[in-house]
């Protein structure tokens, strides 16, 4: 079910990983950001929109990870945009082999057969460095940066006071660095947080890719918490972070393993350099 989080901005939260799909209302239809995961959930969004007399006039994927590149035919045939680098990375995942890998990866979760891959990854690249999403609704600024995934983009809808953070600023997931082939994932991540901080003053709500929607205070708190985590990683300290260890929310205990994995991979990178 769609839930309003700001004037003209609605969110659908998935049962899986608390993934958030975001709807922004415009004069002729809606922009749908990171449409969602399971077929029945995307069908629910399509159904809610048709109940509101709205159609999807544009889509956007914040980054090229499988859970942000999905789509369902019921949502229509509007262009689905992504940054140029996100679209290039999505392109590499369109083969049947790559899709089979996603399905195999999902097997242990029990939702593999509910994740439709027919329209997976069919995004349209925006020009490199595009500053906004081309549509007739409220201005949606693209804040592209190097963090988490190639071409990762947060979106800032100033008129509605909403920051859509992609896979950053989550209350349940720690910063997950892009450790594949990037020269300096730690500094990249810190630079990305500074970009988000640059618009945080105008945000009354932050919507992370996974986790709960936060209010104006949360925007600043989450930036500070993510930065503190990355600083701890850089210094080789054990982070004092509520998202890992005994204070992790029920069902999210595995985030501690993600942290351990990052520590190891960073150590390997440093040893190799
Ligand atoms: Zn991601």
Image (tube, rainbow, N blue to C red):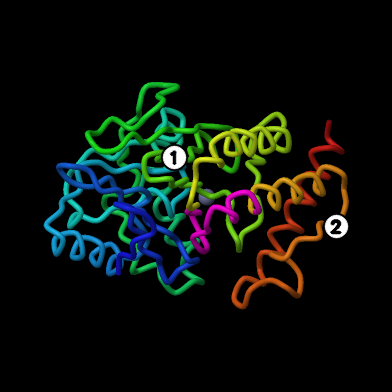
Instruction: State the image coordinates of residue 38 (x, y, percent, origin top left).
Output: 34, 65
Q: Please, what secondary structure does the residue beneath circle 1 have?
A: strand
Task: Identify the residue position indicated by label 1 in the image.
Answer: 155
Q: Report whether 175 appears left or right of 260.
A: left
Q: Report whether 83 appears left or right of 135.
A: right
Q: Report whether 117 appears left or right of 74.
A: right
Q: Residue at x 36, y 58 (%)?
A: 36
| Above/below status of 198 relative to 171 | above
Instruction: State the image coordinates of residue 179 (x, y, percent, origin top left).
Output: 67, 41
Residue 224 counted in the magenta span? no
Q: Residue at x 38, y 50 (%)?
A: 34
Tell me the magenta residue range.
Answer: 207-221
Q: Please, what secondary structure does the residue beneath circle 2 have?
A: loop
What quarter of the picture does the N terminus occupy?
Answer: bottom left
The picture quadrant where one finds residue 6 is bottom left
Which residue is more in the foreground, 49 or 137?
137
Instruction: State the image coordinates of residue 217 (x, y, percent, origin top left).
Output: 59, 54
The picture quadrant where one finds residue 57 is top left
Which residue is more in the foreground, 223 or 32?
223
Q: Earlier in the sequence, mark 2 or mark 1?
A: 1
Q: Residue at x 72, y 31 (%)?
A: 184
Task: Identify the residue position indicated by label 2 in the image.
Answer: 238
Give the CA separation, mark 2 to mark 1: 31 Å
Disc 2 crowd rating (10 Å Cα; few below 14, some 14-19, many 20+) is: few
Which residue is more in the foreground, 238 or 119?
238
Instruction: State the image coordinates of residue 177 (x, y, percent, origin top left).
Output: 65, 45
């Amino acid at each position: 079910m769609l839930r309003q989080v700001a004037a003209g901005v609605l969110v659908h939260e998935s049962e899986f990983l608390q993934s958030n799909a975001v709807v922004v209302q415009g004069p002729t239809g809606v922009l749908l950001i990171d449409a969602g995961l399971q077929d029945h959930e995307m069908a629910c969004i399509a159904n809610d929109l048709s109940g509101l007399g709205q159609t999807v006039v544009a889509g956007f994927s914040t980054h090229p990870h499988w859970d942000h590149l999905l789509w369902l035919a019921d949502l229509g045939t509007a262009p689905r945009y992504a940054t140029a680098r996100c679209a290039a990375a999505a392109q590499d995942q369109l083969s049947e082999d790559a899709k089979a890998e996603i399905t195999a990866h999902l097997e242990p979760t029990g939702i593999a057969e509910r994740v439709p891959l027919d329209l997976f990854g069919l995004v349209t690249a925006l020009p490199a460095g595009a500053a906004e999403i081309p549509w007739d609704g409220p201005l949606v600024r693209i804040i592209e940066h190097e963090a988490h995934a190639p071409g990762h983009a947060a979106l800032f809808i100033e008129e509605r006071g909403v920051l859509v953070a992609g896979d950053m600023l989550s209350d349940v997931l720690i910063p997950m660095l892009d450790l594949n082939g990037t020269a300096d994932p730690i500094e990249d991540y810190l630079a990305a947080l500074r970009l988000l901080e640059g618009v945080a003053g105008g945000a009354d709500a932050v919507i992370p890719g996974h986790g709960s929607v936060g209010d104006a205070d949360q925007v600043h708190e989450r930036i500070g918490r993510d930065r503190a985590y990355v600083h701890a990683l850089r210094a080789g300290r054990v982070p004092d972070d509520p998202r890992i260890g005994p204070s992790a929310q029920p069902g999210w205990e595995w985030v501690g393993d993600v942290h351990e994995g990052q520590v190891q991979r960073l150590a390997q990178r440093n040893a190799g350099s």
